[in-house]
Image (cartoon, grey):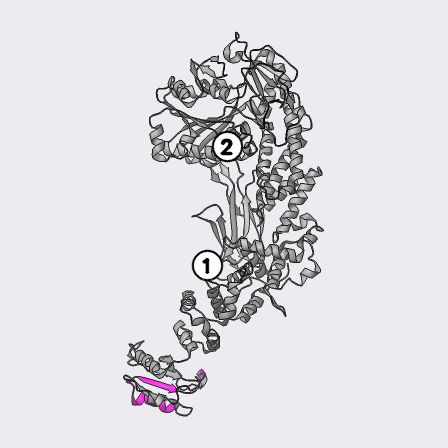
Amino acid sequence: MNLIEVKKILEDHFNEQPSNGARRNIIFWYDEEGQFALDIDTIELENARILKLHENNAFQIKYQLEKVDPDSNYLVYSPLPKPVHRDNWLLDILKYSKEFSTDKAVLIMRDFGVKDPALTDIFRKYLKFFDNQERYKKFASYGMDIFTKEGIHTAVMSVLCKLPVADFEQVVRKVLIGETKAQNKYLEAINSFGDPGSFWELAEKRYGYTDEQRSLEKLLLMLLVTHLSYNLEEKLPETWQQLVRLKKTDSMIFVNSFMNHTADSKYYDVLSCHAEEILKVRNYIDKWDMEKYLECDTFRAFDQAILAKLRDNLLEDIGEFDKYRRIINKRRTSHWFAELEDEYEALYYAVALLEAEKKTGKEIKVSTAFELVHTYANEYFLLDQYYRKFYLHYDNMSNKEHFAGLAEKVENTYAYWFLDELSVKWSEALANQLPQGYPLAGVKQQKNFYSDHISPHVDNDERVFVIISDGLRYEIGQELQLLLQQEMRGTAQLSFMQGMVPSTTKMGMAGLLPGKVTEINDHADVIKDGINTQGTENRQKLLSMKSQRAVAIQYQDMADMKRAEYKEAFEGNRLIYIYHNVIDASGDKSITEREVFNAAEKALQELLQLVRNLVNHVSATNIYITADHGFIYRRSPLQEHDKLSKHDTEAMEAGRRFLLTTAAFDFEGALSISMDYLLGEQTALTAIVPRGVIRYKVQGPGANYVHGGASLQEIIIPLIKFKYVRKDAYRATKVTVKLTNISRKITNRITFLEFLQTDKVEEKKLPLKLKLYFADAKGKRISNENIIIADSSSKQPQERTFREKFTLKDMAYDKSEHYYLIMEDEEESVEKIYEKIPFTIDLLISDDFNF
């Protein structure tokens, strides 16, 4: 700074209005290095007089300022260092005066309101940092009230790491993240414009990291191993023990925060996997008891080991199914669960399927057809669902080869035990029933759907919607019913109907329409009241015979409709049939039949949204959802013994699971079902369906997904009656979770809290996922995070309890202040705070300790 600049700055200061009621401005200038000692006599200020302060004239200057001239502006210049308070004769004047300096560090301190001269060297160290206007403004934006050496170091590094707040924990996270890049720009910035030494000093103070050859890799290993020691019930390997530091709590909380960070957790994954390789974690895990690391999620290897252990136990027929479910449910809160969710879910459904096999026994009990239908609708359908869900997740795995053996076991259990056993027993029961005729007495029939369910609404002039989803078999319908109960306000009741045989789209769609079957023509089209039931236009004609305000529409024609278009399409109509085709469209094509379970998931979401739109856009109240037929599907290729010759039978229509013929023909391995149940006793038309799940030999691919036969999976049709009700009592709500500890005082840095899921999960009570942590009054987190997934459907309260371990940061706590247990609803985007419970913290031991 040159003399002209100094003169201008001083005159600007003297021109300012005196503060605190003073009559004038007095400015002290301690030019410690005497840079302007020779120039001071040449400076002439327009609006102030100059006094030169030396070692022995302090009293003289005091007398001049207070007695001789108490009115003029004065610059008091000293070429000496500023004396300490006890040696400063002019301290009382200095307190109501201003200070001037040409030292950039002092100018910066003055700008930030820093008055402690002990911090001058810190600011002088960062002159290069403050030389940049953008960095200067960012530092100022932190709004620091109290300046300390640690605070200044932290703020500088926070600016260089482009952080929104000054926080050393976030600095460490950003610097470690930089190691995942080709160039660590954060570390380079600290080396260039900050003080790398202060980074390591603070790392030692906060996390206990000391090492002669300090490195980010060693720091990472220390943090991760210390975090692991928090939950591992095995003794750490000797080579790892040296990595565990005394500052365990802050190290543990740092890793916990890093792995749970919304934006940065992906970098944690990269870093922890790198550390896992260095530490050779898997070598040790293989020697440990799985129960000893069930709480650990520092490394992905723990989840991989748990998955492998459960898989191997299932393959070895170790049937501890309750234990496996407990472990899988426990791992749902693991950091790695989201990445490995398909593996865990596939295991979950494999466990369910294999347990069902064990409970059922190798042989399904012989029953009457009537009994077997009801047993299927109440119990056996779940095995179809478990199988579908297993493959849904298996197909989504990135490393299927690890689960190929389990997939083979699931396939053998389902395809070669359940499907074969159930279908054979059902064929026997059905054969015994056929002399009394088809269909079964006492079972609701698809062919009577309109008269039984829809006609009463039409007769009462009530608007009714019917959604027919092609191939929506019973077990998928059951899942849809649960979704409707959970997602929609109202009631969703599930029942079943016995479907038509052959279980084809033509027959099923016809059965759901009003009218009397008068003919099945040469193309196997069903004619009702003289109208062909094929095609949307013909179906509308049949509906219009029952209501002049009827409409039939394809889902694909309304999938993109907005509210106004819904109103236009359905306004004034009272009888609406909507035709949806996702499952059958996928299964009936050889190139997509393998995707049929994915299609089922898509169908569920589309149907749920369709119901939601009908309710929200046109105030639909009565909605029925059903299907034309079900289906059989197995993943494994069919063998020759799975196929049956048609013996050149002449047929009106033929498929892999049926022949529709007038030829009198009976052969082993098939059942003949007269179509007289539709056409009357005079008809010679017969459906010949294979027993069991055997397919007729038909040229070409596409034999895994089939329908047309008379198996339970093909002919038991779901019927969901959804009724929208505005009352809150019919709206699903989440279960309640309460803290059960009576005390609201924490005396140990590590503390356990217990929570109770007060009500069980059921149709109108939904699971609740909570994130739990402690925070101070300003909202700053002071502990690790815990996740509670309250999804238990148990009636026993003890099975709905959660015991969570909290670790507080190593910091000073004011026992007179309130701190808060924050319970956040993970699935809420706006009102996230579920509950905020005040606590006091009065630690018996203030430093860190072993656990």
Whether residue 559 is visible to the viewer of this picture, yes or no, is yes
Q: Is residue 24 above or below residue 61?
A: above
Residue 550, position as x, y percentages in the image: 37, 22
Residue 541, position as x, y percentages in the image: 39, 19
Quarter location, residue 23: bottom left
Which residue is at 54% across, 25% downward? 630
Q: In what element is the residue under mark 2?
A: helix
Closest to the observer: 3 or 335? 3
Q: Is residue 364 magenta?
A: no
Residue 498, position as x, y percentages in the image: 54, 20
Q: Amino acid at mark 2?
A: Leu
Q: Which mark is residue 777?
A: 1
Between marks 1 and 2 in the image, the one whose residue lies nearer the viewer: 2
Residue 158, position as x, y percentages in the image: 48, 65
Q: Is residue 63 magenta?
A: yes
Q: Is residue 534 left or right of residue 22?
A: right
**Quadrant of the snapshot with the C terminus:** bottom right
Mark 2 is surrounded, within 10 Å at the Cα level, by few (under 14), some (14 to 19) or many (20 or more) other residues, namely many
Q: Are marks 1 and 2 in contact (CB under 8 Å)?
A: no
Q: Which residue is mark 2?
A: 480
**Chain part drawn in magenta:** 59-84
